[in-house]
Image: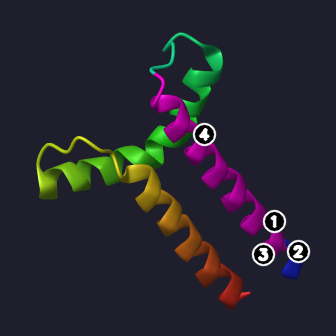
Amino acid sequence: MYQLARFISFLIEVYAFVIVIRAIISWVNPNPYNPIVQLLYKVTEPVLEPIRRILFRSTGNMRIDFSPFIAIMLLYIIRSILLRLF
């Protein structure tokens, strides 16, 4: 069980890192046809899009996208809950 918990924790860390990379790349207006950019968007958009939809619905049209920050915080909360369960 401990090894499973460590593996899940590792996956969450990697996914959080991928979200950070996507956020940083979005600051420089990347080429949307670049395969790496497309991969980053395909991997992170299923998590970021629902958060973004909730944020924009509650706050209106925002200039700064806080969805990567909120997604990372949620990932770490889930990670801490899972580690306590195991």
Q: Does residue 45 appear left or right of residue 64 in this picture?
A: right
* Residue 84 visible, this orientation: yes
**6 drawn magenta:** yes
Q: Which residue is mark 2?
A: 3
Q: Dots 1 and 3: beta carbons under 8 Å?
A: yes
Q: Main secondary structure of the magenta part?
A: helix
Relative to 24, say whether 29 is above or below. Answer: above
Q: CA distance from mark 2 to mark 4?
A: 27 Å
Q: Dots 2 and 1: beta carbons under 8 Å?
A: yes
Q: Position of residue 57 (x, y in %)?
A: 14, 52
For the rendered model, the colour scheme is: rainbow
Which residue appears farthest toward the right when viewing the image?
3
Relative to 59, say whether 62 is above or below. Answer: above
Report the amino acid beneath label 1. Answer: Phe
Residue range of the region highlighted in magenta in the rendering: 4-28
Residue drawn at (63%, 74%), measured in percent from left and top? 79
Mark 3 residue crowding within 10 angstroms, few (<14) / some (14–19) / many (20+): some
Report the amino acid beneath label 4. Answer: Ile
